[in-house]
Image (cartoon, rainbow, N blue to C red):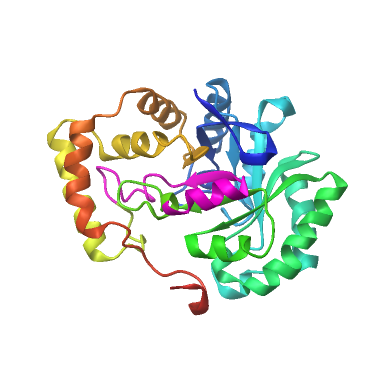
Amino acid sequence: MHYRTLGATGVKVSALAYGGSSLGSEFRPIDEAAGIRSVHVALDNGINLIDTAPYYGRTTAEIVLGKALKGVARDRYILATKVARYGKTAAEFDFSAARVTRSVDESLARLGVDHIDFIQVHDMEFGDLNQIVNETIPALREIQATGKVRFVGISSLHVHVLKQVMDRVAVDQIQNYCHYCLNDTALGDLLPYLKIKNVGIFNSAPLAMRLLSNEGPPDWHPAPAALKAACAAAAALCKAANTDLGKLALQYAMANPDIHTHIVGTASPDRVLANLADAAEPLDQALLAKVLTILAPVHNLTWSSGLPQNNL
């Protein structure tokens, strides 16, 4: 396992991180005992960052993760969770100082810990960026001063939203998803800016929420049809080569040393081990070139999310 330092925080994090969304049965029902084992397998094999959120399973993911972490020495893991998103509808977002302050205490109780390493504003594209800059982040800085959280971060699907907020207020860490992978490298374009800001970088969903897999994306995936078709063609090529597009996608993302960690969600112990094995193998450059050629016509093609004013 490779470890990288998260910007100015000084925290050393595993290049492969554990995503806790599946622990909340966010995508399909899971076996809770297997989910708990998947956390232990990750920790036992060198993964030290666990990322979750109250939104995942509407608090279930944090509850199950709390069970998994019970009895585990606190210095064995770096814990990240989020505030402001609690459901799927617009009414279930709340970026107010009062709500995010209460949210941190609720997460601490569910997780069974006395502090959270990284607290992140979840899916900022659904919020008023002025409120986030002037109210949400200052409230989290006040919580940081109490010792309940160590660092304050932000997250968004949209790369430009991250920059718009960081142009106005300092943060310690960012999380972006589906924008540093085989089909989309928009986050890569922001790396020089992020280096100047010296922030920790979490790249989530390097398989683009299973868009980059031999099995293909779930029905709910918001990708446009042209992007799904191109990824399906890339998957077919990988199948013909007796390999998996997801494996190539993970290796490709993790090959960039300027991105500190890559979050992959699973509640399967076997999948954790498979991801670790895939990450350890060398990248097939010839296959990569062929796949990138297939995906070139849809490079950086994405989808809208959040409030209209936060979409470009």
Between 86 and 118, the one lying in front of the other is: 118
Q: In this view, does 179 lie above or below 2?
A: below
| Count of marks overlaid on the render | 0
Q: Is residue 155 above or below residue 258?
A: below
User: Residue 275, image x and y in percent?
Assistant: 40, 30
Q: In which quarter of the image is residue 10?
A: top right
User: Which quadrant of the rendered structure holds the C terminus?
Assistant: bottom left
Name the residue: 50% across, 71% down: 306
Name the residue: 81% across, 39% down: 114
Name the residue: 73% across, 65% down: 136
Q: What stretch is highlighted in magenta?
A: 189-216
The reply to whether the magenta stretch includes residue 170 is no
- Looking at this view, name the residue that lies furthest to the right: 146
Q: Is residue 2 left or right of residue 279?
A: right
The reply to whether the magenta stretch includes residue 209 is yes
Between 135 and 231, the one lying in front of the other is: 135
Name the residue: 67% across, 48% down: 172
